[in-house]
Image (cartoon, grey):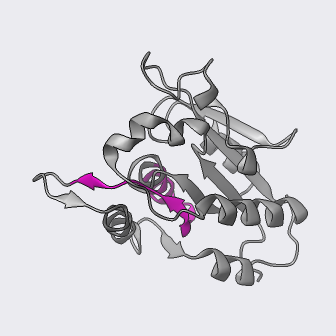
Amino acid sequence: MTRFARSALIIIDLQKAIDASYHAVHGPRNNIDAESKIARLLARWRTDKRMIVHIRHDSTFPESAYRPGQIGNCFKEEVAPLPGETVIAKTTNNAFIGTPLEELLRASHVQELLIVGVSTNNSVEATVRMAGNLGFDTYIVADACFTFAKPDYYGRPRSADDVHAMSLANLDGEYCTVIETETLLQNASASGPR
């Protein structure tokens, strides 16, 4: 049986708002090349005609750069959806809450989810936890996700790599399997049904 033949690539919140100046408060990000790795995965999934789902965060907070009607709500060009690709809008940090994502995946007979995007410890983690709890075979592509430095609960500064690594540790083996882009591309079949 071929791995990832009936998988969906779920791309979370890769919008221009992630580069907005208000993120500077959190500190620098990690995985600077995450977008290029996601673009490689996108190209492969498009070539193989597999399911791709772009998740767009439509913030309801007036001050948010993710609020609809602003440039920050737009997808980043290098990973933007092509005409005909599925785009699902969400208003919480979980791509399953208040959206048709689960229904779409079930109707398409998709069992494996490959989740990438931003930020690792927020919308990515919330979505991965839900996916695992719903019974999907879930993979988080570690080097195709990123987050930002921030202090921990006790006020100690943590680097983006620390925040990212702890989020992956919380998820791996219980809610999902952590995988890297190269491993995923090497293990994906040459082609698979959409």
Kindly identify the residue that appears in the image at 20 percent across and 58 percent down.
157
Q: Is residue 141 magenta?
A: yes
Q: Is residue 70 above or below residue 6?
A: above
- Left or right? Give the position of 92 relative to 114: left
Q: Position of residue 124 (x, y in %)?
A: 48, 52
Give residue 179's quadrant in the image. Answer: bottom right
Q: Position of residue 86 (x, y in %)?
A: 76, 41
The mark total stands at 0
Q: Is residue 111 visible?
A: no
- Residue at the left extreme, as displayed: 154
Q: Is residue 162 magenta?
A: no
Kindly identify the residue that appears in the image at 87 percent across and 38 percent down.
83
- Left or right? Give the position of 72 relative to 25: right
Give the quadrant of the C terminus.
bottom right
Q: Is residue 75 above or below residue 105?
A: above
Kindly identify the residue that appears in the image at 49 percent across and 73 percent down.
178
Give residue 166's quadrant in the image. Answer: bottom left
- Left or right? Give the position of 137 relative to 107: left
Residue bounds of the magenta highlight: 127-151
Q: Is residue 155 visible?
A: yes
Give the quadrant of the N terminus.
bottom right
Q: Position of residue 88 (x, y in %)?
A: 66, 35
Kindly identify the residue that appears in the image at 34 percent across and 71 percent down.
169
